[in-house]
Image (tube, coloured by chain):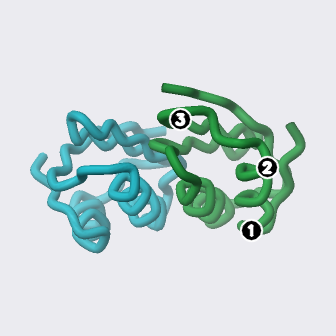
Chain colours: A cyan, B green
Amino acid sequence: MSETTYTVTGMTCDHCVRSVIEEVAKIDGVTGVLVDLPTGAVTVTGTREPAAADVRAAVEEAGYTLTA
Amino acid sequence: MSETTYTVTGMTCDHCVRSVIEEVAKIDGVTGVLVDLPTGAVTVTGTREPAAADVRAAVEEAGYTLTA
């Protein structure tokens, strides 16, 4: 099991949060996504740590920016 | 904040897990979804507890069954 927290900027509302969850959940091996809207923290749980490039692509697909 | 754990039957692989996360994430107010495949436990975090009917509908939309 792996749990990694990223920082996403640009999310302003619950709809943003759901878009990020939906896109990140599409990455192979992801079993959970938790977003803290005030801080932009996105915690991804999975059977293994996802490739950073995959997380970045998913966040950008949702319309936001991965900053860390 | 609210955190509720449901039990979903019928998930057999990572693809099932991702389908459930994607559908449950569409419910208003949901900020996180975490699935434990071996037990079928689906933990939903949100700004408020989602309506049970909404969770049931999302799980069924993904193709699985909410049992608790």
Q: Residues within 10 Å of mark 2 (few under 14, many from 20)?
A: few
Q: Amino acid at mark 3?
A: Thr
Is residue B12 visible to us here?
A: no
Q: Residues within 10 Å of mark 1 (few under 14, many from 20)?
A: some
- Measured in 3D between alpha carbons, the distance from the residue under mark 3 to the one under mark 1, in whole angstroms, is 19 Å
Residue B22 in picture, x, y percent from top left? 56, 62
Comparing B50 with B17, the one in front is B50
Q: Which residue is mark 2?
A: B53
Comparing B44 with B41, the one in front is B44
- Secondary structure beneath dot 2 equals helix
Q: Which residue is mark 3?
A: B45
Q: Amino acid at mark 1?
A: Glu
Residue sitting at the far bottom: A61
Instruction: Report which quarter residue A16 is drawn in.
Output: bottom left
Chain for mark 3? B
Both labels 2 and 3 in a single chain: yes
